[in-house]
Image (cartoon, coloured by chain):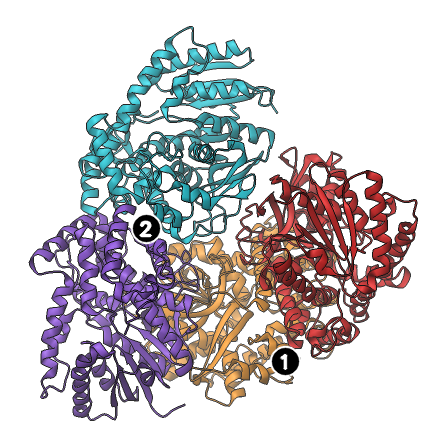
Chain colours: A cyan, B purple, C orange, D red
Amino acid sequence: MKQGIKIATIGGGSSYTPELIEGFIKRHNELPVTEIWLADIEEGKAKLEIVGNLAKRMVEKAGVAIEIHLTLDRKEALKDADFVTTQMRVGMLDARMKDEAIPLKYGVIGQETNGPGGLFKGMRTIPVILEICKEMECLCPDAWLINFTNPAGMVTEAVLRYSNIKKVVGLCNGPIGTTKGLAKMLEVDSERVYVEYAGLNHMVFGLHAYVDGEEVTKEVMSMLGGREKDGITPKNIAALSWEPDFIERLGVVPSGYHRYYYQTDKMLRQLLDDAKHEGTRAEVVRKLESELFELYKDESLAVKPKQLEGRGGAYYSEAAVQLIHSIHTDKRDIQTVNVRNNGALSSIPDESAVEINCVITKHGPVPLTVGDLPIQVRGLVQQIKSFERIACEAAITGNYQTALLAMTINPLVPSDTVAKQILDEMLEAHKQFLPQFFQRESITKA
Amino acid sequence: MKQGIKIATIGGGSSYTPELIEGFIKRHNELPVTEIWLADIEEGKAKLEIVGNLAKRMVEKAGVAIEIHLTLDRKEALKDADFVTTQMRVGMLDARMKDEAIPLKYGVIGQETNGPGGLFKGMRTIPVILEICKEMECLCPDAWLINFTNPAGMVTEAVLRYSNIKKVVGLCNGPIGTTKGLAKMLEVDSERVYVEYAGLNHMVFGLHAYVDGEEVTKEVMSMLGGREKDGITPKNIAALSWEPDFIERLGVVPSGYHRYYYQTDKMLRQLLDDAKHEGTRAEVVRKLESELFELYKDESLAVKPKQLEGRGGAYYSEAAVQLIHSIHTDKRDIQTVNVRNNGALSSIPDESAVEINCVITKHGPVPLTVGDLPIQVRGLVQQIKSFERIACEAAITGNYQTALLAMTINPLVPSDTVAKQILDEMLEAHKQFLPQFFQRESITKA
Amino acid sequence: MKQGIKIATIGGGSSYTPELIEGFIKRHNELPVTEIWLADIEEGKAKLEIVGNLAKRMVEKAGVAIEIHLTLDRKEALKDADFVTTQMRVGMLDARMKDEAIPLKYGVIGQETNGPGGLFKGMRTIPVILEICKEMECLCPDAWLINFTNPAGMVTEAVLRYSNIKKVVGLCNGPIGTTKGLAKMLEVDSERVYVEYAGLNHMVFGLHAYVDGEEVTKEVMSMLGGREKDGITPKNIAALSWEPDFIERLGVVPSGYHRYYYQTDKMLRQLLDDAKHEGTRAEVVRKLESELFELYKDESLAVKPKQLEGRGGAYYSEAAVQLIHSIHTDKRDIQTVNVRNNGALSSIPDESAVEINCVITKHGPVPLTVGDLPIQVRGLVQQIKSFERIACEAAITGNYQTALLAMTINPLVPSDTVAKQILDEMLEAHKQFLPQFFQRESITKA
Amino acid sequence: MKQGIKIATIGGGSSYTPELIEGFIKRHNELPVTEIWLADIEEGKAKLEIVGNLAKRMVEKAGVAIEIHLTLDRKEALKDADFVTTQMRVGMLDARMKDEAIPLKYGVIGQETNGPGGLFKGMRTIPVILEICKEMECLCPDAWLINFTNPAGMVTEAVLRYSNIKKVVGLCNGPIGTTKGLAKMLEVDSERVYVEYAGLNHMVFGLHAYVDGEEVTKEVMSMLGGREKDGITPKNIAALSWEPDFIERLGVVPSGYHRYYYQTDKMLRQLLDDAKHEGTRAEVVRKLESELFELYKDESLAVKPKQLEGRGGAYYSEAAVQLIHSIHTDKRDIQTVNVRNNGALSSIPDESAVEINCVITKHGPVPLTVGDLPIQVRGLVQQIKSFERIACEAAITGNYQTALLAMTINPLVPSDTVAKQILDEMLEAHKQFLPQFFQRESITKA
């Protein structure tokens, strides 16, 4: 084996990068990273430099032997990498804004991961990820691909089904956030809380919750009903309260994203209202981001600024560094990640991606056997898996009818006709990033 | 074995009965029915007599040796029966009217089988069916239970899971109607058309269509798009046109009921519109029924009147008589019925009811192996199965939270809060027929 | 579609051919075969001419418009065929003799289908069949491959997994023979008997037996115990009697071949004894065959001679013609054939071949859903499937270790060491027909 | 929760008990056991006292606050226990001797866990275990049942299927022994070796082996071939060498017990030879045991004597104490135990017991998902599961035919006739301990 670990971070100019750097600094003793390559595209050069320089200052201040490299040549970054992390956003915030705003015009929730917005984010992102996979086959065939890029479930599904890279893990901060939120609600230290998660990305349920190994699921469910702020919902989702009788009998802890499906009308009203006042989530994020980059520019700053936590992606990098750490050291602790199902959930195909508790070993995450999801939530999870599968196919083939099929079977979309209207407007709006749908004329991607 | 066959028809006073009688008359040579017992409840006595007398005149005119018995004592009818058919409607048309009208007040489609209305129809009906099953265990343990009562899928699921009667078949006229409609569209004789059906009741898809054994699915799918009247939609459902690009890529023939899920907004507008003009479907049916009963009273009438065909349940009795015939004679022809899945569809539990093509033998229907549903439709089917399972549990336990859970996870219902509103109003409205929810005070059923 | 049906019979010089011809003559009205091409290899030329001339006389005498063509050019036969039947024997009777005799030297039953002999028969045959499949892709891509060649289960498995031909059916006369035997035992007409078969080729069980649709399995099981001649065992297998208490509780009708596994020591003694007196089965067959060919030469013979029935393969051609007939006419009757499992038996992989009751349609056989095999027989069936899978892999790769693995895991073989001894001697003995194991020097096949 | 932990050890008079006591002493800090109840039957009173007094001396010498109680009243021991460990031997060594000797008379390996001997051990033991389960329901419904009693797989299967105790774990020292043996062979510390085990008890395979997280399976497989002493075979099994070509291609690490199936003839010869010279294994064990009890009597002895390690059950108690420790502290480390499959191995029923790597939590062991066993070993594992299932049924029903069925389908038994001979002689020999087969006249058990 090589001396130190080489990390390649695709989309290195992201505002999240300082968190990642901080994570590697903190764990440097056990996880001897020696090179971090931050790669980005021409359009992201300015941000890459701002973030990259902050990263360099952070490393220097910490006094650890990590080299930070900035590059616009992705292949240079990938060459001999041990871990490839992906956090790019094809089309950048502009695209996300459209993902959310266009559906809303038709009275439909955009939902940038499992909704109409997610379909488009997937169709823009998956071809780029698969291109990275091809490059990895040549440049770093033994590396692990750690994907943070949303829609993380759909992207993992696509890599598992359509690439030769088998060492892939999709990552989400959701489960960590839920566990921390539950700990707070239960007024115990979060290390004492263990939750058995199973489902799909942004469609994961906490099947059982434990404190010190003792089951507390019932108590949790009765605490969750009727709360204005439940503490387990990510900042980017309105934490509307649950009907107590519903949530108690549901019997499993939903993710914040489940509100889009179990509270569709209320969430839609909220989103329409937000759009009027503070703008869509994408606009809020854009504002946050530009403030962050202002901070990053400050040459006296050499640590991750606190304000980054308000960005919504809390624990994302923590999750990534922790995962890389456990793989590298064969730690065999339990983390919640997106991997090949392999029979862990019996009504999801073996070959599909699921988000599930895994033992993290040097040879990868091994899912803990669940058996099957409780019947009351099984159908919705399977429906989103149907959507993800057809969405992946649309992303790869660039077939119009397949994209319409994905849009129509999405549970947030009220009909084939509305699906077609949204699809047509979004295809036009994202044209630049969807070459597979437009005779592959001009290709522009991360 | 006994000499002739005894049929017990629960809900014998139904307007459909003449069709059933006609079926037994037509097949009398091969299917030697000697006794038909029409049983009904006190409240249905008047109708039972009208229909029963027509039945007697029909038999007499046809000159076949079938005795028609009318009774208000269900047990007398069940005693030593060979086949028990159930076609009752707990709460009668009044209840159905509420099933449809109350959800509409909240902007939600009632859908009397797989929607909120179906939940209530199931909760009223399942306890009565399970009571009949218990009586059958004593009075006719070897009889087949042929259930036409809707929601036929949910009822079959409940009998399979919660009773000791294993010889149960749920029956729907939908597949026959679709096949006949396709034949007309393809301009061929319906005997030449074969469709591989699989799914759930009112949630069944035609996976492949054949004419003379040659596959024509693609042609069918491209013919189905954009049609105003597609000819495969039952009369009780508005045959709104499908987006051609959607339906072509869907690749499998939907049932009329799929419009509620793939065209929710358009169907809702149509139903609201209908409710203003011609009333809900229940009101239309009530009018049709009272006209029919006027006809039935006519003592000179001794055949099934043509007008019955306009009632919407075309082929229902044809389906039933044909099924009984094939069981009795071990015919081994293929019919589409609701039975235990047993592995025919791999992502539905083995123990659950599915609607599927079966070889009909003397020992019952044997499903033809499908493997799995195509991924694009799998999720929706699984979601309705989740709903059916929870609805059955609510029907049996009378648990308020379980009923709310069923209502909320139904794909037609937009949120837990609206679910609660509809549930509360419907529980009150149907109080009389839901003793399991109201401390079992007063029990009134079929 | 073309005017008439073209049949290509690979291994046309087989002694079974007259039965096939007779079958096509009998059904000529409904199954308008116009050309039968009998193809064979150079070494089989003499036999091909004898059999082919008999076939021509048969057709002429019957006065049906079927052209008989004899050819040593397989491709000519395959060109535009509608059905390809394979009945060749790579290495001819000499090879079979070795398949049986060599294991016996080591005290092991040869068993030419699922035993050590079967492994070698498979390794000789599968490469040839896959070559035929490749030719079919070009010359008759829409044709059905009807494979009689043993080991039929292993061959079907190989075609399903390693070729692009999906329209393949493996055929065995065993189930028909068992049904006829049971009918005789029950003293009823065989048309009145229906048996639900499921398992693998030569490893199939009759799970339920019916007369006129009424279950008689228990009666059958108690009749089967202790019988010297049970009437359901093919002539090539010694019909040793079953322990009544064992067979009754087994509860499902075994095939004759199950004796090799449930009566291993007794069968071995019998085979050793036979080998001393009448020679191995292969030697008996050789004698029968040469007598048959003497008969066939007789130019006054223009019908299938009765003596062919003694050959052991009774009903083989009946089965084949019946199958072709039902496919051609979309008859949808039930036959027992080897096809892709597709979930019909839940503990066998979906992609594997099983022998099972199917509805025969124009688009192929559709298995009737069984659920799972009874637990008492499940393990043995799965073990033979493990053997078949590894044997297929050995046949294709020519890997010595894989062949040794297949030999060792076979339940008839007592140890890895004996497996190696038998393997080594048999590889040497069959060298000529196993080019894949010997650097592909000289290839000689059917 | 109560203050300290109460352990009830059924069969407390076993020679293994000192190891168990030593384990609890060593871990007393983290695992605060305060009471150990050693329960035994009247016939075992003398041994119980010898062992119990040694246990008391051990505890006293160690200076830990554990009370040792000796009792002949099982219920007293079970009352409010936290963990119940079972290590009894119904019929004692005499019975085991017969389990091995009687089959050998018929040229059949006795194999006291998965063979004919195992069938009888199971039939003697399972009814007693189920009786203990019933008592536990009343006396300690929240306790964990940790079963060491062989056949551990069959016993776990029986508890899972036929009792209401769901908190049951079957335990075997095999996997620990294999891992230690592999470590020695690889010349690394055993903590650095991790093996992915999956299968059934005494039928478990090491699917992948790792050193420091790096896969070494191939190296291991090529080292295992041709070795006289492989170091991974328990002392009670002759470590005959494997054919290198077989074992390499097998590709997974067998347990010592697999020799009975892959080297049947060689093992049989060895056993027959041993029986002539040193007696059956049971006789060897009897001698060892009486020597051990002589040692135990020595009042100056207050530690586990070294000689116990020669007994063959090395690591058994280590395994048990480690398991109890991890459950109690919710440690979430990985151990190999027998539990409900729940989908971890896809071709074994969900409800069945498997031996598999699990994360050990306070709420029990959670299996790591395997997917499926490699095809080459799947069939044998499934066959033993078939045997175990039928054996359990025979144990519970006392049905002669079912016992004969289990005996006949066992892969070590050559025919139904030999099965019957062995069965009849063994039933007679064990009559006293098989009341379920003899009209439940006189019941004598642990």
Q: Is residue B140 left or right of residue C152?
A: left
Q: Furthest-left residue in view?
A: B277
Residue type at numbered disc 1: Ala
Whether residue B137 appears in this view of the structure is: yes
Q: How many marks?
A: 2
The structure residue drawn at horizontal position 6% and vertical position 58%, both measured from the top left corner, is B277
Question: Circle 1 sits on which residue?
Answer: C239
**Residue A243 at what x, y percent from top left?**
32, 45
Q: Nearer the viewer, residue A10 or A221?
A: A221
Q: Is residue D29 left or right of residue B154?
A: right
For the residues marked 1 and 2, what is the alpha-carbon distance in whole angstroms? 60 Å
Query: How dense is the environment of label 2, judged by Cα within 10 Å: few (below 14), some, or many (20 and up)?
Result: many
Q: Is residue C197 left or right of residue C119?
A: left
Q: Is residue A112 above or below residue A405?
A: above
Residue type at numbered disc 2: Ile
Dot label at residue B409:
2
Which chain does the residue under circle 2 lie in? Answer: B
Kind of element beneath mark 2: helix
The lab-note entry on whether marks 1 and 2 share a chain reads: no
**Residue D376 at what x, y percent from top left?**
61, 54
**Residue C375 at what x, y percent from top left?**
57, 66
